[in-house]
Amino acid sequence: MKSMLLVLAAAGSMVMAGAANAQAGADLAKAKGCLGCHAVAEKKVGPAMKDVAAKYKDNKDAEATLTAKLKDGKGHMKVAASDAELKTLVQWSLAAK
């Protein structure tokens, strides 16, 4: 019984952490101007985040590839953000549904 409670508590923590990370990613995307060209569900100037996630779904190098594009400005405008912020933005984009 005690181990079942620990498992449920751990699962609940992961769900809450995932929701917090999703909100942090959305807030950061807004603050960095990403949402001026991208939306989560529909194409604007750039592709929808859900389309980016679908494109890179099975690509094991997706996070590194997208981070490099944002950091170096190759194939995408350069984003003025720290490495940690870029990681948050890319993970949020790849998790879009």
Image (tube, helix red, strand yellow):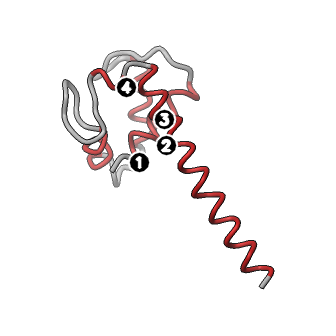
Instruction: Single out the mark in the foreground, 2 or 4.
Output: 2
Name the amino acid, label 2.
Ala
Give the mark, 3 or 1, whose residue is nearer the N terminus.
3
For the point 26% across and 23% down, the residue is: 37
Is label 1 in a helix, a strand or a loop? loop
Q: Earlier in the sequence, mark 4 or mark 3?
A: 3
Classed neighbour count for the residue bearing mark 2: other residues with Cα under 10 Å, few (<14), some (14–19), many (≥20): some
Residue kind at label 3, given as amino acid type:
Gly
What is the spatial separation of the Cα atoms under label 3 and label 1, in whole angstroms? 10 Å
Element marked by disc 4: helix
Could you tell me the amino acid type at mark 4?
Lys
- Can you say whether 39 is above or below 57 in the image? above
Q: CA distance from mark 2 to mark 4?
A: 21 Å
**Disc 3: which residue:** 25
- Which label sits in the foreground, 4 or 1? 1
| Residue behind mark 2 | 22
| Secondary structure state at the residue bearing disc 2 | helix
Mark 1–mark 2 CB contact (< 8 Å): yes
Vertically, is 80 above or below 56?
Answer: above
Q: Tags 4 and 1 in contact by the CB under 8 Å rule?
A: no
Q: Kindly check if marks 3 and 1 are in contact, taking CB atoms under 8 A apart as contact.
A: yes
Which residue does the numbered mark 4 point to in the structure image?
69
| Mark 4 or 3: the one toward you | 3
User: Could you say where residue 50 lies in the image, as x and y percent from the top left?
Assistant: 29, 45
